[in-house]
């Protein structure tokens, strides 16, 4: 066994039960180093069927997966190993994991893996493949297998995660879409989780700008979740890439989403939080980002809104304050790049009265009574103008009788 100090120095800070370095695999139980072995070259095996089979077994996460490769040589060797040899590893991977491997060494499970590998609509990328994102290999717990659907997965030096809560305000939704639109138009790849709320608006903004966006799922890439995102899901297949570490057919489960957040941050150079409550899952993504050495940015929100408590707390803790897309371009060393302008409203050809009402909403949402005071129009006339503006898609009515400019239409 090599010297502990030399190997642990190479590994850096270690969490959890195992750690991969360029040369060693380290297994740790209760903070005690129990095993240090030389890491085999993953390119020794490229049989994707066995990668799919092993990574699909319950309780075989990425740490256990890579430990098993080290001990047996390849996923195929795990398939062909004896039960006695597997049971010898129960101290390191757990009784239940060994039991599940033995239960899944049946032809039906291998046949299922073969069907996934042969599906022309799904691209399977293993950790051993050249296409596997190098930036993702640098995180502590990289997924062993990625399932991709849509356009070929592209990884650049300009990848930004935009995340936030599922429950949002109109402010949060508009800001997320605006930032994604302008930054995507400037050349950044937008990464998010395709959840309702901020995630969805980030993907929509990137797609509308004609840019490239990656959606990291907590379910299979063939599963639409949440159901109301079906249209966006289809657009992502056409203009972006859907990826998941979960095999096709996997339904969304609460435990899947915190785990997928490490991939969202792991694929990105930085994470931007648009709007998040104090218990938002977006804060988990920030924790992963900090562990992975990624930058964290946040957009300030209403100090009395519960939807902004998490975001504002991030700023108090040292997150970079962002107030415009140019701030991020500067952080990325792209200060010379121009953020894409939002869609022009000139094409709507507003008349003089419509323009007055539209300009009255310049500084945020307004109640009908406020608009009457600003424009001097009678309520009946103002209502008629607002109806026309809504039909043209430049103004939106919010709950509570408030009106706001529609940034996109």
Image (cartoon, rainbow, N blue to C red):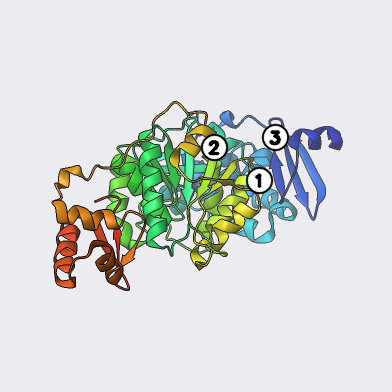
Taking the image as drawn, is residue 197 in sight? no
Give the farthest residue toward the top. 336
At x 79%, y 56%, the residue is 30
Within-10-Å neighbours for mark 1: few <14, some 14–19, many 20+: some
- Confirm or deny contact between disc 1 and disc 3 (CB under 8 A): no
Q: CA distance from mark 1 to mark 3?
A: 16 Å
Q: Earlier in the sequence, mark 1 or mark 3?
A: 3
Q: Which residue is mark 1?
A: 291
At x 69%, y 57%, the residue is 94
Q: In the rendering, at what x and y percent does residue 235 appear? A: 28, 47
Q: In the rendering, at what x and y percent does residue 392 appear? A: 16, 54
Q: In the rendering, at what x and y percent does residue 184 appear? A: 38, 37
Q: Which residue is mark 3?
A: 21
Q: Is residue 175 left or right of residue 34?
A: left
User: Which residue is at the front of the view, 105 or 55?
Assistant: 55
Q: Is residue 309 left or right of residue 12?
A: left
User: Which residue is at the front of the view, 380 or 301?
Assistant: 380
Q: Give the number of the disc on residue 264.
A: none
Q: Which residue is mark 2?
A: 269
Helix, strand or loop at disc 2? Answer: loop
Give the mark toward the camera: 3 or 2. Answer: 2
Within-10-Å neighbours for mark 3: few <14, some 14–19, many 20+: some
Helix, strand or loop at disc 1? Answer: helix
Q: Earlier in the sequence, mark 1 or mark 2?
A: 2
């Amino acid at each position: 066994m090599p010297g502990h100090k030399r190997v642990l120095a190479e590994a850096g800070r270690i969490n959890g039960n195992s750690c991969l370095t360029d040369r060693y695999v380290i297994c740790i139980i209760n903070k005690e180093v129990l095993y240090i072995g030389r890491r085999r070259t993953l390119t020794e095996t490229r049989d994707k069927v066995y990668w799919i089979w092993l990574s699909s077994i319950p309780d075989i996460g990425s740490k256990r997966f890579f430990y098993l490769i080290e001990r047996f040589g390849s996923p195929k060797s795990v398939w062909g190993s004896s039960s006695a040899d597997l049971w010898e590893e129960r101290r390191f991977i757990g009784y239940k994991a060994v039991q599940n491997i033995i239960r899944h060494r049946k032809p039906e499970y291998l046949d299922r893996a073969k069907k996934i590998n042969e599906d022309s609509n799904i691209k399977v990328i293993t950790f051993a493949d050249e296409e596997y994102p190098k930036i993702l290999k640098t995180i502590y717990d990289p997924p062993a297998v990625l399932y991709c659907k849509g356009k070929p997965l592209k990884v650049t030096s300009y990848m930004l995660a935009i995340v936030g809560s599922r429950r949002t305000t109109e402010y949060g939704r508009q800001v997320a879409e605006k930032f994604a639109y302008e930054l995507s138009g400037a050349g950044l790849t937008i990464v998010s989780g395709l959840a309702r709320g901020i995630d969805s608006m980030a993907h929509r903004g990137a797609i509308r700008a004609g840019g490239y966006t990656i959606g990291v799922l907590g379910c299979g890439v063939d599963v639409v979740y949440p159901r109301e995102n079906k249209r966006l899901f289809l657009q992502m297949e056409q203009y972006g890439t859907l990826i998941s570490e979960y095999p096709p057919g996997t339904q969304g489960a609460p435990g899947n989403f915190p785990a997928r957040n490490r991939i969202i941050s792991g694929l990105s150079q930085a994470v931007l939080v648009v709007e998040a409550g104090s218990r938002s899952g977006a804060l988990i993504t920030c924790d992963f980002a900090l562990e992975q050495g990624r930058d964290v940015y946040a957009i300030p929100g209403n100090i009395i809104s519960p939807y902004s408590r998490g975001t504002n707390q991030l700023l108090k803790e040292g997150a970079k304050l962002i107030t415009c897309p140019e701030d991020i371009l500067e952080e990325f060393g792209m200060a010379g790049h121009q953020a894409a302008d939002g869609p022009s409203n000139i094409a709507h050809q507003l008349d003089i009265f419509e323009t007055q009402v539209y300009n009255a909403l310049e500084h945020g949402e307004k109640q009908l009574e406020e608009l009457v005071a600003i424009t001097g129009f009678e309520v009946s006339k103002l209502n008629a103008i607002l109806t026309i503006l809504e039909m043209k898609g430049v103004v939106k009515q919010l709950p509570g009788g408030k009106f706001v400019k529609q940034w996109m239409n």
